[in-house]
Amino acid sequence: MSLPTTSPTMIGRASDLSALQAVFDAVAAGESRSVVLSGEAGIGKTRLLTEFTRSVRSSALVITGQCVDLGDVAAPYAPVLGLMKDLVAQRGRDAALEAAGPGKASLATLLPTLGPDAGDQREGGVGRLHETVAVLFEALSRDRPVVVVVEDVHWADGATLSLLAFLVRALTCDRVMILLTFRSEDVSRGHPLRGFLAELDRTRRVERHSLERLSRSDVLRQAIAIRGTSLDTVSIDSVYARSEGVPFFVEELLGLDQDRDGEGDELPDTLRELLLARYERLAPATQQLLRVISAGGVCVEHALLERVFTGGPDALDIGVREAIGSNVLVADATTYEFRHALVREAIHDDLLPGERSRFHAGFAEALEAGVGGEPVAAAVSHHWMLARDFGRAFPATVRAMEQAHAAYAYSTESQLGERLLEIWDQVPDAAALVGRSRSELMRRTASALRNAGWTDRAIAMVDEVLATPEDRDDLDQAKLLRDKAFYLANLGRPGSVDLLEQALDRVPPGTPGDLRGVLLTSLGARHMIIGRLERAIEYADEAAREAVRTGSARNASVAANIGGIARIHHGDLESGSRMLATAETLADGDGSALLRYRVNASDMANLLGSYEEALASALEGVARAKELGVERSSGLILSSNAVDPLVALGRWDEAEERVHRALALQPPLAFSVYLRQSLILLTLWRGDTESAATMYRRWRKGMLSLSGLEVQTRFGVARVVMQVGLAAGDLAGAWSPAGVGVFDATDHRPMPAYDLPALADAARVLARVRVALATGTLDVASGPFAGVDDDQLGQLEERWRALLAEERFWPTAPLWSALVDAELGGPDGTGDDVGVWEAARAMAERPFAPAALAPYTALRLAEARVAAGDRPGAQDTLVVAVAEATTLGAGLVLDGARVLAERASLNLDGRPRARGTSGSIELTARERQVLQLIAEGLSNRQIGERLFISAKTASVHVSAILRKLGVATRTEAAMVAGASGLLAASARHADRP
């Protein structure tokens, strides 16, 4: 009698199943979660998934996808295609399209039968595809939880990993569970999955779960479940030792043990022997069939196998039946696959060279003939490569590269490009077959490398092309230089401007096409962001004329955009604003140009102090991006632009939520830096100086690298350095070249939008340095303050004030000028002039002032009034500062208010100060004696008589006590002292000898 292949019940996985069920319960409650299940081959990952999905199918939509082993170059989106097919099979095509929302046309990238409904599926690029899949799962999860299973992601292509990473980040409050599996032993150092897993590990909604080997008792239970009876001790010890607790190996050993003829057959000792043991007991014709199937891949269509197998239909059916009966193969309605991938790999590894070539060539020919449906070009290329037929592999790889590009599978596209370059010299007429020269193929491959995120490799390949002594015309050379410039800019590295100008020199006016226009707009943009505004305007104006000549509305919009922004920064606000409005008109219908307009328009409104307008513009763009199905890709940039206006308007919780959401979705490099700057300063102003300083240290390298290329980043980083340094007591850090020193950079050019706020911070630092210098706590002999004296500081202030005067045309200049005046006010230039702080406070109440400045200026005004001896005025102002800071959540101001209140004996809320304990206030020994006598009701004269001091001296002590207790009368002093335990402490002091 034949025994079951596997145990009817799952053994040793109860806790693992419970862990998956717990995650599913959290998902069903409304929180998206992901699980990455790992373990060695044969450990039981698929069995666990089968049991788990069976348990939740009644309450969830379960869709599955399987990664395919095609060697080094995986087929694009193979498991995602499986997910879509499974979804359509369960829900139908129309339901899937309806759930996909506005981006449904892009699903044709994954499954062509989903595509004919709408528009250009390439509009919005890979971001739209990612967003559409996320929207699809979100919509489906509203009806019931969705469980997305992808097996064997160690075989996944880069595009699939990118999509899965996006889904994990983007799906947060939806009832979606993503369940991934991989073979742990296959993920060696340098494997693409390692980076993917590291990224997932940074997401709190992801759990890693590793399956362990079975114990001896579990192996015994598994054996009993399979055989129906127990094993003797010797047998179970043998099975346990040979299997090492791997369930699949236990099953194989038990099956072989049952099949032994009792004449001394031994169980296999090596893994290879074990994997091939069942196979080697089959008839020769069946073994031949299995060798053919092993070349076909993980899953082989019957029609395809029938075409490739040369033994005839009857032999095929007989062989398949025997293999299934012997638990080597499993089959469904149309496909065959080995019961375990390890068996397929062992049989395939055992193929003779001639067999390998014939079988793979057969599959390649059958696929090219359309057997089994529309061929996947990557699979055809894979089979021809293993057949070692490079002449036929080359055109197949070209087609695969085109398919990968069309599917945004840039990692696969780049790998296929590298494959073509590897076999180029072995293929006659390679250039004719690929339709381009070797250099052009390298440039195309470099572009794919960049798009896949491997920008360093892209630069290396472009450099190799540039160093190749191949005849190229000026246009080809210009394209290479342009590409390298873009790649350097992507990485935040210098050199792009020079390369773009070299490229432009090779594309004279009148050259057909858009290349010259693209170079001009790119140069205009690069010069603008480094502060060379005159050059930016020149290039933008020339780009506008070029756009008219070529009829490019997109280039015309971008040129107007750059020209308008540069003019505004340069001081021509009126004409710059008109040009910017023109950019919007010209961008109508062009998603890329319109996005660029909205990003710059909302940013400029924020810089000009029009925070409501900036926020409305950014959110309008986000809403439009959502309508187009690109909310979390292109729309992410506009969402980022909403952060600073929200902070300025005092809507800090909304701003912080957007920052975290945007950073989780990994925006472009520059926007990541902007968001991190905003988060650091927001954290600081909330009062968490330590966390702000930690974040800056963690992100410092990336922020500083980009600051060398962008004025905006340079001054944003400077503000972070100065404000964090001041709050953390790191005056030297605030004074560093990255802080105050930003104004001394040789390439500094006036840009008021960024200069003015930084000048206010720099003025605070300068005032602190003056105080330290005056008190002798500044080390002027060495270090960052070496040689600093009053004259040098005075000259620095003069230069800054000259810059202020030069930039007074900027709409927010009155605010920042008032702050600089206040920070450096007073006879010593240390910020203690009441009048200028009153002016700064008035400015901070204007609509163009960021919300944090209102409580900040109130606090500084209170400090100035204390210094001037105006205690009542200081008290009133401090109460206002505390109230405003409390409403805003400005913990930094509240901390400063507490320090001032303690130092000056002021009340934080306007009421008499209450002391918690006697130790919270410092009274001299004489003041404690006086306080005790005040509580006894004695007058100043009586106190003087009791203590042998004059009545006037007693009065001075009484006044000091009232001030320190924060009260107005002697009765209040006695009450507060009694409630706080201060009287008892005073009595103890009085009793001392």
Image (cartoon, grey):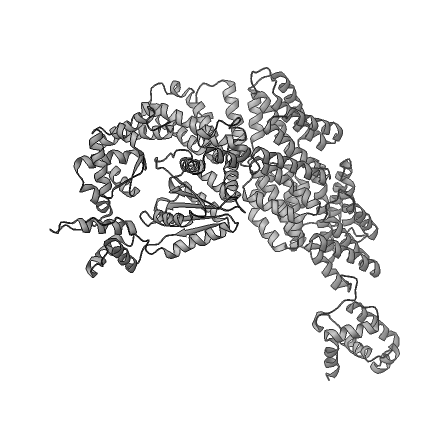
Q: Is residue 803 above or below residue 436?
A: below
Q: Is residue 272 above or below residue 412?
A: below
In the image, 741 versus 99, the foreground residue is 99
Q: Is residue 857 above or below residue 419?
A: below
From the top left corner, tell me how far across and down residue 899 is, in percent. 72, 61
Q: Left or right of 696: which side holds 199?
A: left
Residue 382 shows up from this direction: yes
Q: Left or right of 884: which side holds 12?
A: left
Q: Quadrant of the C terminus?
A: bottom right
Q: Residue at x 78, y 69 (%)?
A: 965
Task: Please give the count of numbered marks on the rendered protein.
Answer: 0
From the top left corner, tell me how far across and down residue 560 is, in percent. 67, 26
From the top left corner, tell me how far across and down residue 511 is, in percent. 57, 16
Q: Residue at x 69, y 49 (%)?
A: 787
Q: Quadrant of residue 626?
A: top right
Q: Left or right of 589: which side holds 323?
A: left
In the image, 299 versus 240, the foreground residue is 299
Residue 463 shows up from this direction: no
In the image, 296 versus 13, the foreground residue is 13
From the top left corner, tell me how far across and down residue 595 is, in percent. 61, 31
